[in-house]
Image (tube, rainbow, N blue to C red):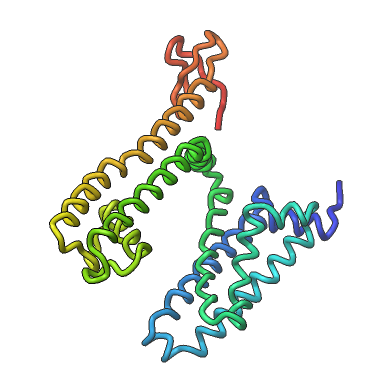
Amino acid sequence: MVTLTRKQRLYQIIFGTQTKAGQYFDIVLIGAILSSELILILSSVQTIESEFSTLLTVLEWTFTLLFTAEYILRLYCSPKPWAYAKSFYGIIDLIAVLPSYLAFLLPGSNYLLIFRLIRVMRIFRILKLAQFLKDSNILLRSLLMAQRKILVFFSTVAILVTVLGSLLYIIEGPENGFTSIPISIYWAIVTITTVGYGDIVPQTDLGKALASLTMLLGYSILAVPTGIITAELSQEMKTQRDFIRCMNCSTSGHEADAKYCRKCGTELPEHL
């Protein structure tokens, strides 16, 4: 029988979900994360904060110290501490404790602790919801594949709102609230995204005509990124379907949740 070292036992508990202890650890961790987030949300309510200020502060620092100890333990028992520190979860785990300490230098930064909520994503590992992870990976890959198209799109929109804002600044001028080109660009962004705060509105007929054009452009522009991402998502899902191939007749193109071949009825190999 192989005897595990202290580091190895800690690693099984903290990083693993195969053992009962590891599962219980992650469940308790998620409960602590949700509790700390609830405390953070309650502390932003003025009436609650004024009445229970001391209690909320004590609880917040209790969770912060617990998460700090947990982060140190993760670094201690990890076979590759630096690799863990640079990983997605490693960075999130660090962000989960930093804001409390930064609050000494930057008041109000403790509200960045809301990022702790991202750590709840560990529930996918605990419950072994592989299908959810697979779906999230498909979406992430689709966004990565579309990043250049999206960058070109946003660059075009940035140029467009700059031109429209500058034109409206020339047409309306400071006397109608458009006191500078940046303010006019802000109006163009608000208008082209169809938000329409109404804090600044054109007064001249030519300005209103330009505003109408900007609004119409907004409706057509909003459909572009949706189409780009949808096309990439469709392609990624097609790739996933092609990957699921029948061992009997070599037919591909099965749905992700298919159990039997759509052509010959043979049971498909297991896939995640």
Quadrant of the drawing holding the C terminus: top right
Q: Residue furthest front?
A: 170
Residue 173, quarter of picture: bottom left
Report x, y in % for residue 188: 30, 56
Q: Residue at x 25, y 53 (%)?
A: 194
Q: Residue at x 28, y 66 (%)?
A: 178
Q: Residue at x 81, y 58 (%)?
A: 7
Residue 89 in view, yes or no? yes
Q: Residue at x 30, y 52 (%)?
A: 164
Q: How many marks?
A: 0
Q: Is residue 76 left or right of residue 149?
A: right
Residue 135 in view, yes or no? no
Report x, y in % for residue 45: 38, 81
Question: In the image, is residue 63 above or below residue 247?
Answer: below
**Who is closer to the viewer here, 216 or 27?**
216
Report x, y in % for residue 176: 21, 69
Question: In the image, is residue 104 above or below residue 141?
Answer: below
Q: Is residue 125 left or right of residue 229?
A: right
**Who is closer to the viewer here, 140 or 79?**
140
Question: In the image, is residue 58 above or below residue 170?
Answer: below
**Who is closer to the viewer here, 266 or 155?**
155
Report x, y in % for residue 49: 43, 86
Q: Residue furthest left?
A: 205
